[in-house]
Amino acid sequence: MSEVFLSYLDEDRDWTRTLAEELERHGLVTFLRERDPEPGDVLLQQTEAAIGRAGTAVLVLGAAALSDPQPYEEYAVLLREAATRGLRVIPVLCGDPGRVVPPFAADRLWADFRGLSAAERTAKAGDLAAIVRGEWRLAPEHLDQVRPAPPPAAPPPASFVVVYAGADAGYGGRLVSWLSEAHLPVWSIARLTWGSEYTREIRDRIRHSIALVVLMSPAAEESPDVTREILDGQRHDRIVFPVLIQGAPNFLLASTWYVDARDGALPGPAQLRTLQRVYRDHAAGRVAQLPPPRQPAVTAARTPTGLELARLRASLADGELEHADLLTTNLVLAAAGRLGYGWLPETAGADLPAQLLRDIDTAWAESTAGRQGFGRQRQLYRLQHEFGGDFAVLATAYGWRPRPDGRPTYGEQPATPKYGRFVRPDSPPPGFFPTLRNPQAEHYPGWHARWRKTVLAVHRQLRSWPIEG
């Protein structure tokens, strides 16, 4: 049987020795650094060897554990072993029942020996030995530790979030300075530092942003980070202010108004006034808008379908259904040559490659066990009328609008809300995705009619699919 390595402070030496003896009475082999090395042994080497032999490490945490750095250092070694070879690490609390758990051990279920009598401690040591041997035992603190998550942290201050690829950091830094000099609140990834929880912080900044200022370039087009950040912004209905510094407009922002800065110049006074107006509207609680989209001066970047399908599958594999939904819409628009417009007329469905729709459906079906995808939608409701007179029935069947019988459905609202309130990450009903929504268009009047036409264009092409299952 593999050894049990006991990590402890000198203040808890006697208590730990008693625990080791009780574990040994249950047939376990234990290692104590002050007992087991032979005279002349190098203690550090013997300790490292014992950790290497151990199958379980018991981390004894007494009164001094909050103030002494030693358990933090040894815990780091044990945690590395847990990650690389599966060492089991069990925190054990001893001493005063009023002591709090050190934060570095609070994310693991601990064995609570605090305030126990000698008999109770002996019985609990038996439970611990059984768990080390692989037997399951329920202890009261197991239930106590299944506690609510801590309250969410206060949201970061609202600001313009500048999004760019690493290769564009030079222009990005100039743009951040330009916004700051105009007395507009601004944040970018350059504000991150060592120790930042960067994924959470970036997402929080985007979710609570005034708007995203996105630098568009070939490097940004290829960057999975920039792609994810744009999708996060669209997911939360953030206004996007794109700045084209090289190449063509981004695949995900093809139908959005943008600033052409390919000459290297910063945005001008007119664009600054637009951002100042967006800032004032946000501060006053009003819905801000950018200028209406115009036909772009350069053709939108057409990312190869294979790469976008790979991004779709990656988002689905990560459980990012909203990201996958938005990528699906852009794939469909690009296939019909309508990426720059952001929607499909009802007759445009004939231009959609049947194989692409099949590939999209397969990706959704495989990652959601058949709950989502075009095929699942077809099982729920097949478009009947040539000119879409039954769109309301279709939308009800897919959970996009309230049922006429009053039963609650996903995203129930008196009117169809913007995308950020329309979708939620938890348990969408079968057939909810893909929605074919385009948040880029939803900052302008008439977006609902364009969404309806896009859905009808695609689902007319799906009418010929056989219904399976």
Image (spheres, rainbow, N blue to C red):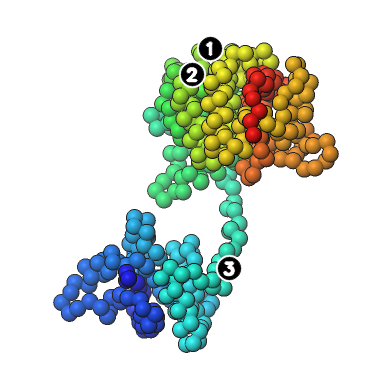
At numbered mark 1, what does the secondary structure look like: helix, strand or loop?
Answer: loop
Q: Would you place residue 159 above or below residue 78 in this image?
A: above
The earlier-in-sequence mark between 3 and 2 is 3
Tell me the kind of residue under disc 1. Answer: Ala
Q: Can residue 222 be seen in this view?
A: yes
Q: Report the side of 176 relative to 388 (left or right).
A: left
The N terminus: image quadrant: bottom left
Could you say where residue 367 lies in the image, as x and y percent from the top left? 54, 38
Distance Cα–Cα, label 3 vs label 2: 53 Å
Q: State the residue position of label 3.
A: 143
Could you say where residue 70 lies in the image, as x and y percent from the top left? 34, 69
Q: How crowded is mark 1: few (under 14 residues within 10 Å), some or many (20 or more)?
A: few
CB contact under 8 Å: marks 3 and 1: no
Q: State the residue position of label 1.
A: 297
Residue at the front extreme, as displayed = 469
Q: Would you place residue 123 above or below residue 46 in this image?
A: below
At numbered mark 2, what does the secondary structure look like: helix, strand or loop?
Answer: loop
Q: Which residue is drawn at 19% across and 72% down?
A: 42
Q: Report the side of 222 relative to 330 (left or right).
A: left
Tell me the kind of residue under disc 2. Answer: Arg
Tell me the kind of residue under disc 3. Answer: Leu
The image quadrant that residue 19 belongs to is: bottom left
Q: Which residue is drawn at 61% across and 32% down?
A: 373
